[in-house]
Image (cartoon, rainbow, N blue to C red):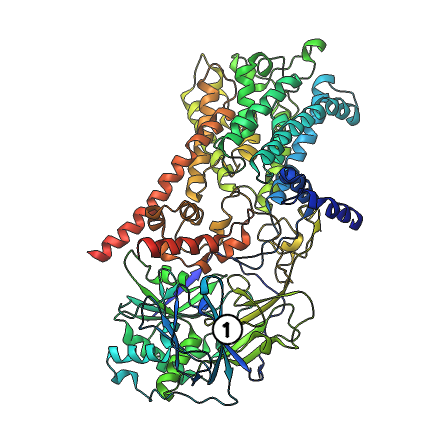
């Protein structure tokens, strides 16, 4: 079963420093990091103490709201430090790694021979459950529920994003097993959406309904596929998993080990030789980027430049990310920078720069705000980059005033912050759309649940 | 430029929080950000941002207005002096008259904006860059400057700031200024003597095409003159050609809605055509060919620069079609069957400004209904 999805709205931003298809490994970090803030809405309850020894797959903490959801160590070693912030909030957990990993054995399993509760238990115990997120809200799925479908997007359209065909190559077996695991969790379909032009890796995947997607960013966002294939209604749940995480789940069943090794791209105009690296989840950023960056004032982003998170060198790559972007900071003044048709090194959706003459140029964009925040004035620009059937400006306004009924009516359940990332980008009033939607989702979780 | 930046950085601390002149911070920031796009970096959300900002958007509209403004300035001279003079003679004649109006409009309007920014502690918005140029362009050239001043004050305070400033107003501020002037100082705003500079003194007849029609006479202005703009009227409105150049620029840069422009055109054409079909022995306007309606009065200027104001127009895509269409319909309707106003464009736009939120409401409602229907289908 295959259905094509063609996305017309959107904007592809071409940036300098796309990763070359070349794979190296980074030297093993001494310290590995777990950041609870990677798991949105989770308040960690610690199981281990400082000084305790852990293996790969040992539980480090569980979620306060649901003790079934556990988070495990990506590495074997000794818990070095639990870094806390204001009101004793746990910011990160640092583990001093041993030279070689020892794994907790979960036993090899054949997913089709297990009952659903056993599959869930294995996922929960190994920490793999965290890879499964739900829509609405874009938070970790509730293991007591059953989704109407599971969506996997293997099409990455965000600027600089890693080529999934490359990062998954050679892992067909693990991926297939992962799909079998996921299909146990739903009575509906497992939907896999792939790049219509390049999907060689996914041609032989069994047990999924395949969708060939084409179009500009955000055509690769899983939220867009859900809205086209099987939109989320009030009270319904859809689960989403990322392809590289399907592989980790598959590996768990095939080998009995939780092995969060993944291939990530290190990209961006500030990277000397942008390419791919094999890293273990939790590796510190400094070990990944050391000696590989242009020595300027940089911003390191875990994830893509539109919806990623700024990180320091002491942090780690985000749990769900397979890309580290490094861009120049943009804290400079521009003399008469608002003069139309001047400053053509900048990229714009509007034709107010001569950059519209060079649509294929790769831009070196920095983090300058390019203006100041203003009331919403220009209309129509948000709609140009929103392929989901909602009214983005009206939804944002409803969210700003916290009108729950209106938010529900206007489709808050169908969106995640990342779907509004391009609105952040194009808005001439510099609206923080992702932040507004995130707060709106928080409100919905609190009030509606 | 580094010298200038250094000077600014030197005085900046006085206006920052805790500084001596903290209160005037917004005004200082207004000037500073005019000179320099600030060094702010993204702190949440997307890490990279589009190069466009509101200042750039507003400047695009100002640039789009320039052809009509330059032609209008020339035309002031041409209408007064008639044939046989050089371009510069016409232009300087017009320039001397229009420059004070522009200075007053910007000076008074921006003064109020800055004062509001200081008192309310918010940043100075760029919206007035466009409004300030629009206001003189839609006024008669002979308007006394004090009337212009009062109109500007009314438009900015009641039309805009009372609602919360740029982005919040319901009515187009420039049209509020014009409507205020029209109803307060009607003798200076209509009739056959206001549309040409010094027409009373010099004895030049200065009736607009619509004025002639409203008096039930048949105008003699040629189609060529109407298209090029060689006729009396408000400063900006006469030349359809120059307005089209501005429109092309706006549409090319993506700063104005082509949907509104097109649907207004369709609406006005249909309405004019309907009246042509009906015909009348007592009202010459009924018989005026529908396509000529598009060339005269403020229609072209209105749909390109006024109806497309994103703040006061409908905001949804479907809503824009309806909004523009109704502006076209009402503009011609008011023109033809309203005996007191020879031109209906201003009233049509103001009326639809009021109804734009209602139009949007119903458009959005249909999206909501679709969502609810989908849910019911699943439940059933």
Which residue: 66% across, 30% down?
Answer: B106
In the image, residue A405 sits, relative to residue B114, either above or below, namely: below
Locate the N terminus of chain A and report the quarter of the image it occupies. bottom left
In the image, residue B102 sits, relative to residue A228, either above or below, namely: above
Quick check: can you spot residue B274? Answer: yes
Crowding near the residue tagged with mark 1, few <14, some 14–19, many ≥20 C-alpha atoms within 10 Å: many
Q: Chain of mark 1?
A: A
Q: Position of residue B3 (x, y in %)?
A: 80, 48
| B37 or A379, nearer to the observer | B37
Left or right: A168, with A407 as reference point: right
Left or right: B209, with B98 as reference point: left
Residue at the left extreme of this rendering: B380
Which of the 4 image quarters holds residue B24? top right
Locate the C terminus of chain A and report the quarter of the image it occupies. bottom left
Which residue: 62% across, 34% down?
Answer: B114
Left or right: B23, with B180 as reference point: right
Q: Position of residue B170 (x, y in %)?
A: 47, 32
| A355 or B80, nearer to the observer | A355
| A79 or A260, nearer to the observer | A79
Q: Position of residue A120 (x, y in %)?
A: 29, 77
Element marked by disc 1:
loop
Question: Disc 1 designates what residue?
Answer: A322
Which of the 4 image quarters holds residue B143? top right
Quick check: can you spot residue B233? Answer: no
| B378 or B299, nearer to the observer | B378
């Amino acid at each position: 079963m295959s259905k094509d999805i063609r996305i017309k709205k959107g904007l592809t931003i071409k940036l300098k420093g796309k990763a070359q298809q070349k794979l190296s490994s980074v030297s093993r970090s001494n310290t590995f990091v777990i950041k609870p803030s990677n798991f949105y809405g989770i308040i960690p309850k610690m199981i281990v103490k400082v000084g305790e020894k852990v293996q790969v797959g040992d539980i480090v903490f569980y979620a306060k709201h649901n003790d079934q959801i556990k988070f495990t160590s990506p590495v074997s070693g000794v818990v070095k430090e639990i870094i806390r912030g204001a009101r004793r909030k746990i910011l990160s957990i640092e583990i001093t790694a041993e030279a070689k990993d020892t794994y907790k054995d979960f036993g090899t399993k054949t997913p089709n021979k297990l009952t659903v509760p056993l599959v869930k238990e294995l996922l929960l115990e190994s920490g793999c459950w965290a890879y499964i997120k739900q829509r609405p809200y874009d938070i970790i799925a509730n293991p007591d529920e059953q989704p109407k479908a599971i969506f996997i997007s293997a099409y990455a359209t965000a600027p600089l994003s890693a080529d999934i065909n490359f990062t998954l190559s050679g892992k067909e077996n693990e991926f297939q097993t992962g799909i079998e695991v996921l299909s146990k969790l739903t009575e509906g379909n497992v939907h896999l959406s792939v790049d219509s032009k390049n999907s060689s890796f996914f041609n032989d995947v069994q047990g999924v309904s395949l969708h060939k997607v084409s179009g500009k960013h955000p055509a690769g966002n899983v939220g867009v596929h859900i809205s086209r294939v099987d939109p989320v209604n009030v009270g319904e749940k859809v689960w989403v998993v990322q392809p590289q995480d399907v592989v980790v789940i598959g590996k768990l069943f095939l080998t009995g080990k939780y092995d969060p090794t993944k291939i990530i791209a290190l990209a961006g105009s500030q990277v000397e030789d942008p390419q791919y690296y094999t890293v273990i989840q939790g590796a510190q950023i400094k070990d990944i980027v050391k000696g590989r960056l242009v020595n300027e004032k940089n911003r390191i982003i875990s994830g893509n430049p539109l919806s990623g998170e700024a990180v320091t060198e002491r942090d780690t790559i985000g749990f769900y990310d397979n890309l580290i972007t490094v861009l120049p900071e943009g804290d400079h003044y521009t003399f008469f920078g608002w003069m139309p048709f001047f400053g053509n090194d900048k990229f714009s959706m509007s034709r107010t720069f001569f950059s519209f003459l060079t649509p294929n140029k790769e831009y070196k964009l920095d983090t300058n705000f390019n203006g100041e925040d203003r009331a919403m004035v220009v209309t129509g620009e948000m709609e140009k980059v929103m392929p989901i059937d909602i009214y983005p400006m009206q939804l944002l306004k409803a969210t700003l005033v916290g009108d729950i009924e209106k938010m529900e009516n206007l489709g808050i359940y169908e969106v995640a912050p990342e779907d509004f990332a391009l609105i952040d980008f194009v808005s001439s009033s510099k609206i923080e759309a992702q932040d507004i939607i995130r707060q709106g989702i928080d409100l919905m979780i609190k009030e509606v649940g | 430029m580094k010298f200038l930046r250094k000077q600014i950085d030197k005085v900046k601390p006085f206006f920052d929080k805790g500084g001596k002149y903290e209160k005037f911070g917004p005004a200082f920031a207004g000037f500073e950000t005019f000179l320099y796009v600030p060094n702010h970096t993204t702190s949440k959300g997307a890490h990279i941002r589009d190069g466009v900002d509101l200042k750039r958007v507003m400047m695009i509209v100002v640039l789009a207005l320039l052809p009509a403004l330059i032609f209008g300035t020339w035309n002031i001279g041409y209408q007064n002096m008639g044939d046989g003079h050089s371009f510069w003679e016409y232009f300087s004649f017009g320039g001397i008259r229009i420059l004070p109006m522009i200075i007053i409009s910007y000076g008074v309007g921006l003064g109020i904006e800055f004062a509001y920014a200081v008192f309310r502690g918010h940043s100075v918005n760029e919206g007035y860059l466009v409004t300030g140029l629009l206001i003189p362009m839609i006024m008669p050239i002979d308007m006394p400057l004090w009337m212009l001043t009062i109109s500007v004050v009314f438009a900015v305070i009641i039309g805009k700031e009372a609602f919360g400033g740029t982005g919040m107003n319901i009515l187009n501020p420039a049209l509020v200024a014009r409507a205020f002037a029209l109803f307060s100082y009607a003798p200076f705003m209509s009739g056959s003597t206001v549309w040409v500079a010094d027409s009373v003194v010099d004895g030049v007849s200065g009736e607009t095409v619509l004025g002639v029609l409203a008096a039930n006479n048949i105008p003699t202005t040629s189609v060529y003159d109407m298209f090029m703009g060689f006729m009396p009227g408000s400063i900006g409105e006469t030349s359809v050609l120059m307005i089209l150049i501005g429109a092309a620029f706006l549409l090319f840069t993506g700063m104005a809605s082509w949907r509104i422009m097109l649907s207004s055109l369709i609406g006005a054409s249909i309405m004019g055509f309907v009246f042509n079909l009906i015909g009348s022995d007592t009202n010459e306007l009924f018989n005026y060919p529908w396509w000529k309606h598009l060339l005269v009065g403020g229609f072209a200027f209105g749909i390109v620069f006024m109806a497309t104001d994103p703040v006061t127009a409908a905001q949804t895509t479907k809503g824009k079609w309806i909004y523009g269409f109704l502006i076209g319909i009402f503009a011609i309707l008011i023109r033809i069957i309203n005996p007191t106003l020879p031109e209906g464009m201003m009233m049509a736009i103001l009326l639809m400004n009021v109804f734009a939120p209602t139009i949007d409401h119903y458009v959005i409602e249909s999206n909501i209904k679709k969502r609810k229907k989908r849910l019911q289908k699943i439940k059933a």
